[in-house]
Each structure stands twice: as structure tokens, then as C-alpha cells.
Image (tube, rainbow, N blue to C red):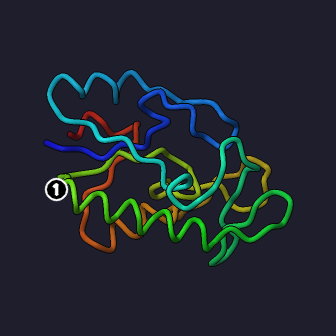
């Protein structure tokens, strides 16, 4: 399978804090699958490092109050374009992220509180019928 993967899970230093979040469970999949890195936030034009952002209602807001919904939406569309262009079969996206989180994300208060919901990219992928997993679900692949 060709699997699109959040680049931070593969060890790329693209997270908001300039660090990676390499995950051994995801990295082990390279022996059986083709893993294609993507960072929707960078594809949307955001720099690394950058201020943290969370979803508040229908918008993505940085900790300083700046609305970055447009950048997150652009990044999701660009990731979707690459997914289709490269004929991917599934996606593994970073849990709890405002772009990549699936089913559970931070609640928008910047307090570490979780709530039900999807990140912008995960939501777009699911709307298009793409099978989305998080790093905590690699055993399902």
C-alpha cells in the first residue's frame, strides 16, 4: 500500500515547536508499505516553528488570537491533491492535531483539554472517503 503519513511521525522536524514526533509503530510500516510524508500546515504556508493553534468552533486560531483557518484549509486541499496525484491508499495522521487529528482534538482553550472532533485535513480526507488512521491505530493496517 501507499500510505500518506504526517511527516512529523516519520521524524521530520515540522511540528509547531520545530520538533518531530517520530513514532516507531509508524516507522516499522516502511518494511511492508510505501510511506509518503506530508505536513499540511507547511503546505498551507505556515512556517516552522510556529505558534500552537487549536480549533475553536469553525476556525483555527493561534494562541495569540490570529485566525489561521485559511492556511489550514489550503494545506488540507494541497495534501488531498498529493494523495490523489500519488495514488495513495490510506493515511496515517498525527493524533489530536488541529490539522491531522482524528476523532479527538484539543478543545481550543490551550489548556491540554481534549474533545471530540477532527482536524481540518482529517475531516477533508474522511469526507472524500479516505481511510484515516492515527499513530495509535497502526495495528489496523
Across and down, in percent, residue 75 comes to 49, 63
Badge 1 marks a residue whose secondary structure is loop
Residue sitting at the far bottom: 58
Q: How packed is label 1: few (under 14 Cα within 10 Å), some, or many (20 or more)?
A: few
* Most foreground residue, 50 or 117: 50
Q: Residue at x 42, y 61 (%)?
A: 122
Q: Quadrant of residue 15?
A: top right
On the picture, is 18 further left or further right than 24? right
| The N terminus lies in quadrant | top left
Q: Quadrant of residue 66?
A: bottom right
Q: Residue at x 57, y 32 (%)?
A: 13
| The C terminus lies in quadrant | top left
Across and down, in percent, residue 111 comes to 79, 50
Across and down, in percent, residue 50 comes to 72, 47
* Most foreground residue, 89 or 134: 89
On the picture, is 64 further left or further right than 103? right
Q: Is residue 113 above or below residue 108?
A: above
Q: Residue at x 66, y 74 (%)?
A: 59
Residue sitting at the far right: 64
Count of numbered circles on the image: 1
* Most foreground residue, 6 or 123: 6
Q: Residue at x 73, y 66 (%)?
A: 61
On the picture, is 103 further left or further right than 141? right
Q: Is residue 2 above or below residue 132?
A: above
Q: Quadrant of residue 129?
A: bottom left
Q: Which residue is mark 1?
A: 87
Amino acid at each position: 500500500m501507499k500510505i500518506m503519513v504526517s511527516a512529523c511521525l516519520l521524524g521530520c522536524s515540522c511540528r509547531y515547536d520545530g520538533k518531530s514526533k517520530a513514532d516507531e509503530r509508524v516507522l516499522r510500516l516502511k518494511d511492508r508499505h510505501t510511506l509518503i510524508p506530508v505536513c499540511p500546515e507547511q503546505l498551507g504556508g505556515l512556517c516552522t516553528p510556529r505558534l500552537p493553534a487549536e480549533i475553536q468552533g469553525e476556525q483555527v486560531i493561534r494562541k495569540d488570537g490570529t485566525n489561521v483557518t485559511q492556511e489550514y484549509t489550503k494545506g488540507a486541499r494541497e495534501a488531498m491533491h498529493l494523495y490523489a496525484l500519488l495514488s495513495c491508499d490510506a493515511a496515517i495522521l498525527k493524533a489530536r492535531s488541529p490539522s491531522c487529528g482524528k476523532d479527538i482534538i484539543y478543545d481550543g482553550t490551550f489548556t491540554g483539554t481534549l474533545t471530540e472532533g477532527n482536524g481540518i485535513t482529517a475531516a477533508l480526507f474522511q469526507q472524500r472517503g479516505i481511510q484515516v488512521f492515527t499513530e495509535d491505530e497502526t495495528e489496523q493496517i
